[in-house]
Image (cartoon, helix red, strand yellow):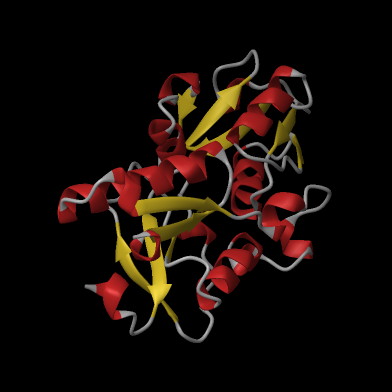
Amino acid sequence: MQTDVVKIGTRGSALAVAQAAEVRARLMAAHGLPEEAFEIVVISTSGDRIQDRPLSQAGGKGLFTKEIEEAMLDGRIDLAVHSSKDMPTVLPDGLEISAFLEREDVRDVFIGRSIAKLEDLPQGAKLGTSSLRRQALVLRLRPDLDVGMFRGNVQTRLRKLEEGVAEGTLLALAGLNRLGMPHIATEVMDPERFPPALGQGAICIESRIGDARIGR
């Protein structure tokens, strides 16, 4: 019956949908259920819609989860799939992180438009990233670079790179692996030199506290 379908909430980027599909596949295998027992529900979030300023100026990481969590509290979805590094420190009342998938590669990668390594970029070159952590780490290594905001999903950032908006950018290797695109990385950053974000590479599942149907 349709009422028995488990609804999985996710953002709409290719990476987010791929992560939700991975969770669905694991649930199908674990419970012996067909694909029709699950529905992936794409939800537009404030973090995806705001592209004109850093998220730190608009409300922080919770902007990637707010609308999805509201849908779960309203009963429109049963669980949500997130990148752990996008999760806020405090969750809404009634919700919990109920599971994690095995952690993927935690490292960041540099993707250069014509230069393969971060250290080889010419002085004053433009590097785009929206992450304050990555901005700080880049400027510690290369204070001469022009580091600016670079919002958007993986495909959007790669398009901007091709268009010459910047000479390079940084992304999580885990996301590229899940999209089948690790080959586009021109340099894998040493985590001792370029520490990853907390939770980077880990997919988490958020659900309602006490939901016996989903929690079993």
Q: Is residue 135 above or below residue 121?
A: below
Q: Which residue is farthest top?
A: 114
Kindly identify the residue that appears in the image at 33 percent across and 47 percent down: 36
Q: Which residue is farthest right?
A: 52
Front position in the image: 191 or 56:
56
Q: Is residue 78 left or right of residue 214?
A: right
Front position in the image: 9 or 134:
9
Which quadrant, please, contains the C terminus? bottom left
Q: Position of residue 90 (x, y in %)?
A: 52, 79
Q: Is residue 180 above or below residue 216?
A: above
Kindly identify the residue that appears in the image at 40 percent across and 40 percent down: 174
Q: Is residue 24 above or below residue 116?
A: below
Which quadrant, please, contains the N terminus? bottom left
Residue 103 in view (yes/no):
yes
Q: Is residue 160 left or right of residue 3?
A: right
Residue 198 in view (yes/no):
no
Q: Position of residue 195 (x, y in %)?
A: 46, 49
Front position in the image: 156 or 122:
156
